[in-house]
Image (cartoon, rainbow, N blue to C red):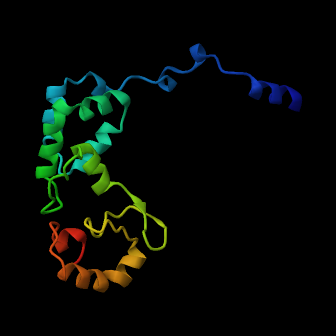
Amino acid sequence: MARGRRSAKKRKLDPGCLPSEAKSQPSRLDIVPVEILAEILYYVTSPKDVLSVARCNRRLCTTLLNPSNVMIWRRARSHCIVPGLPPPPPGWSESAYAAFIFDAGNCDICGVWTQRMFLSFVVRVRLCGKVSRMSQNILKVCHDNHSYSVPLTSAGIK
């Protein structure tokens, strides 16, 4: 009996015999016109949300990365919950700038993966919670000695 079970596991499934809910269906966002998608994304509070929608599937990525739709990214940045977020540096697209600001990464001190944003955009320092608590005073002194375009409060320092 065990032999029969083993051979049954090795058989490939016929896609025609899968239940209807198991078959992938196109997303409803795929059929939404760009104008309506732009209107929906008008109400987001961060370019991170637009970035998440762009990463849903290939069509949305192509649509939102199209240079003609840059106004969606700019509007999201203008409504951003991070106060004083400057425009992207010259040569940067809005989408690349949003990924730079809001994507997660490794802590620059201990190398642990963290969801935190950069603590200093100028120095490009991302710190995990543990290292951040230990080094806030050092960063505050460094920040006070230089003029930066990103305020201390948006960098998480009070």
**Residue 150 picture location, percent across and down:** 17, 67
**Which residue appears at 25% of the width and 72% of the height?**
156
* Image quarter in which the N terminus is found: top right
Question: Farthest residue in the front direction?
Answer: 91
Note whether 37 is above or below 83 in the view shown: above
Residue 40 location, x and y as percent?
16, 36
Tell me the residue at 25%/81% (across/down): 142
From this view, report whether residue 91 is shown above or below residue 136. above
Q: Is residue 1 visible?
A: no
Quadrant of the drawing holding the C terminus: bottom left
Which quadrant of the figure has residue 117? bottom left
User: Is residue 77 in view from this perspective?
Assistant: yes
**Residue at horizontal 18%, vertical 42%?**
73
Q: Nearer the viewer, residue 137 or 79?
A: 137
- Residue at 17 percent across and 70 percent down: it is 148
Asked whether, in this view, residue 44 is left or right of residue 103, the answer is: left
Report the residue that reaches farthest toward the top. 16
x and y percentages locating residue 99 in the rendered image? 31, 50
29 or 79, nearer to the observer: 79
Quadrant hosting residue 135: bottom left
Question: Relative to 38, is 153 above or below?
Answer: below
